[in-house]
Image: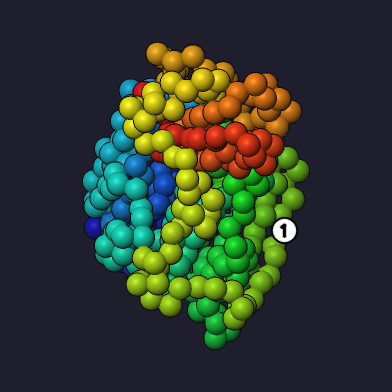
Amino acid sequence: MDVKRYSRQIILSGFGVEAQDKLFNSRVLVVGAGGLGCPVLQYLTSAGIGQVGIVDFDQVEVTNLHRQILFKEGDVGKFKSIAAKERLEEMNSEVKIVSFTEKITADNVSKIIDSYEIIVDCTDNFQIRYLLNDICTIKNLPLIYGAIYQYEGQISVFNVEKEEMRTNYRDLFPNPPSPSEVPTCNQTGVLGTLTGIIGTIQAQEVIKIITGIGEPLVHKLMIFNILDYTTRIINFTKSEKNFTPKNEDEIKAIDYEHICGVFTSVNEIENLSRLKEVLSQKKSILVDVRNENELPKISGFDYKQIPLSVFKENIHILEEYDSIVFVCKTGLRSSRAVEIAEGKFPEKEIWHIRNGIETIF
């Protein structure tokens, strides 16, 4: 370890070489290399964490660049975890960077996280968030949570013992919200500065836990508003009533995608031939619920574009059809459209493309 490199933090009162050694001997896994994950990765790598793992199965898009500042234009189309690894290795050659391009599931989560001491949740979907919470609770691994919505961000620290108890995400939010209650950045928008602030605080919480300096946000939820800089701290406690799996077998038995409402249990389309079969029926229509500027565009099929953000007020457009197929980027927004359409048109056949547009087109 090059002590000179970290000298400006080593000379801090209460820090010293001992704290730097703790950082250099630590292993941290960051799940999600997006708006939150990028600043977390940059600051942990710069601070001298010994090993940093990156989990992200997504690819860099041009719409990511305004807030995911670890990436550059030439990275568009690359796996985020691989592009991030390349950049971080350029920043600090002393840090071991490990990338994972697969999606975390109940089957592989234990294998992925077992080499790490602290997990940082920088995801933007609830099935992975609840899965991470549950596995970290079972393994007593600290979990640093961060999330954003429009102009507000949230941060908390889970599974760290204080006052003879450990709290987790389910003590704050026992049950996942329904799909219609969960807007994404694609729908509501996001400022890159907010993801930078919240991600930086997440990185700071990691450093505090490893080195022992300061008071981490244990049993506390911090809410920060970027418009007026108001900050609220909500204290919470352990609730024995909340369900949490007791072991890994129970985790594998849970269908996280189902409980989080990501996909409908029926009428899912997973390949091009099935899509063609459904759309060959009379009075059938393909509906793209992405925003109009999102790529790739659909080709080879007639379709209507109704962004999910305005779907409810425009759903009447679909009254003339007997069979409706929804598509979006990942399957999340299309599953929400299914939920809304089934409530409006119980007599119609409602489908969606399970894993999003790029799995078929």
Eyeballing the image, is 38 above or below 63? below
Q: Residue furthest bottom?
A: 164
Left or right? Give the position of 354 relative to 340.
Answer: left
Left or right? Give the position of 147 relative to 74.
Answer: right
> Which one is nearer the viewer's eye here, 259 or 349?
349
Residue drawn at the location 29% of the way across and 44% of the way down: 101
- Crowd band around label 1 with a 10 angstrom C-alpha radius: few (<14), some (14–19), many (20+): few
Determine the image quadrant of residue 318.
Answer: top right
Determine the image quadrant of residue 321.
Answer: top right
Residue drawn at the location 55% of the way across and 20% of the way down: 283
Total residue callouts: 1
Residue 1 horizontal/vertical position (percent): 24, 58
Left or right? Give the position of 306 relative to 103.
Answer: right
Three-letter amino acid code of the residue under disc 1: Arg
Residue drawn at the location 64% of the way across and 44% of the way down: 180
Residue 39 horizontal/vertical position (percent): 46, 44
Residue tagged 1: 232
Determine the image quadrant of residue 306.
Answer: top right
Residue drawn at the location 41% of the way across and 43% of the way down: 33
Q: Work out whether residue 19 can be spotted.
A: no
Eyeballing the image, is 137 above or below 307? below
Q: Work out whether residue 55 can be spotted.
A: yes
Residue 267 horizontal/vertical position (percent): 47, 40
Dot 1: element = strand
User: How was this image coloured?
Assistant: rainbow
Task: Name the quarter where the C terminus is drawn.
Answer: top left
Residue 36 horizontal/vertical position (percent): 49, 45
Left or right? Give the position of 53 relative to 332.
Answer: left
> Which one is nearer the viewer's eye here, 310 or 213?
310
Eyeballing the image, is 146 above or below 341? below
